[in-house]
Image (cartoon, helix red, strand yellow):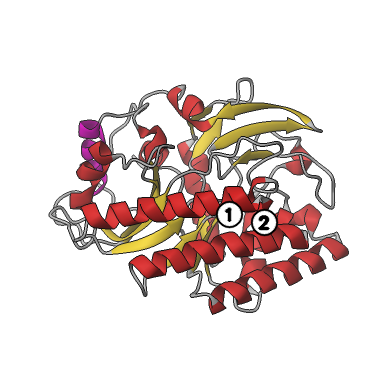
Amino acid sequence: MRSFPFGRAVVRRGAVGLVALGLFGAGLTLPAAAALRSSPRLAKTVTSVSSPSVMLQLSTVASAASPTQLRGWLRQICPSGVKPAGRIVLQDIAGTDGALLTSYLDVIEPFLPGASTHPCFGKVYVGTVEPNWTGTGNAYVDGVQDATFVSSYLAQSAQVARAFVARYPQVTTNWYVTYEANLNDLYYPSVESAFQTLLSGEIQARSAILPGREVMWSPAFWYPYSSYSQNTLGMSGLSTSLTTLFTALRASGGLTIVDLQDYVSGSSCQPVSNRMTSSDAVSWVKFLRGLTNAPQVLINTEQYGIDCATGGITNGTPSEVLARESYYQANGLTLGPAFELRYWIYNHE
């Protein structure tokens, strides 16, 4: 694991769909698909809520719901006649082989803008495929700096995006960058430069398919702001690196939205001093908003919980999730698409 300016390990839900429990260099790693399969099926139904802003992880939804069940969930949260107000992120839309997950996408299409026969979401942000890094280290630091891996990923991602537009031409598609990041790691210029190459490649490729569309990305900070902000050198370097990144991305076509993961759920099994709080998340959003050329910054309120004994993803605690959402709104944050749909439904009965 790459050390940060504070040198501590973290729990993460990241770009390759992993939940890793790191304990000072030795840890337990569990694929997200397996973790999601261990989560109980939803015991609640939603009867009267407005259109939400949510993420849907298609690569794992089959473990929780059939296409028919997914259609039922969408109808529950978006009853007929609701004026579209929410945003949905299709976090990934293809398997590792690059084939579209059409059995679910065909069900989702009628709920999307442009092709909608059942009004629901005002905007859709379409991702592509999770990066499948099999080398040493992780996809966020080591994989993103491997030029051969990144080139192959960009080609596969573009192919998946083209396939989506070809199959669903009526959908008013905006774009989502599936490859996530730990923004604290961009303190290192080599990592920032690597993400600049990756993100510029994604933005330019998507613009070639459908120009002028919004582009969303959902990275995280893995360190609590209350601790990291005491490191003057770390904050200065991070400010410089992220300003460099956002300035370069604006020149390459523009990253429209950062939907920052609050990382409260993701860090919940760490020692107390390394857990992200709602206050930390607010401070990180304000930090990003203050950077030159920063895009719009929303907050991704993580909806799930973690079983610290197994590392499995579980349903969140509704009262805690709702309190977090209220706290963010009271502190001037805008709720963005939240990870993930099946847990959002459970929390918003």
Query: Which residue is labeled 1 in the image?
Result: 219
- Where 144 falls versus 57 (above or below)? below
- Image quarter hosting the N terminus: top right
Q: Residue at x 39, y 42 (%)?
A: 98
* Residue in the image at 67% along x and 56% along y: 183
Q: Nearer the viewer, residue 197 or 43?
A: 197
Residues at circles 2 and 1 in contact by the CB criterion of under 8 Å: yes
Query: In the image, what residue type sits under mark 2?
Result: Leu
The answer to whether 295 appears left or right of 228 in the picture is left
Q: Is residue 164 visible?
A: yes
Q: Which residues are magenta?
A: 67-78
Based on the displayed image, in which of its 4 quarters is residue 40 positioned?
A: top left
- Indicate left or right for 103 with 327 as reference: left
What x and y, as percent, mark residue 85?
Answer: 29, 62
Residue 132 vs 287, above or below: the answer is: above
Crowdedness near tag 2: few (<14), some (14–19) or many (≥20) residues, C-alpha within 10 Å: many
Q: Position of residue 241 (x, y in %)?
A: 73, 68
Q: Nearer the viewer, residue 187 or 314?
A: 187
Q: Secondary structure at mark 1?
A: loop
Q: Secondary structure at mark 2?
A: helix
Quick check: is 68 in the magenta stretch? Answer: yes
Q: CA distance from mark 2 to mark 1?
A: 7 Å
67 sits to left or right of 156: left
Q: Main secondary structure of the magenta part?
A: helix
Q: Which three-letter amino acid code belongs to the residue tagged 1? A: Pro
With 104 as the anchor, is 338 left or right in this view?
A: right
Of mark 2 and mark 1, the one earlier in the sequence is 2
Residue beneath label 2, please? 183
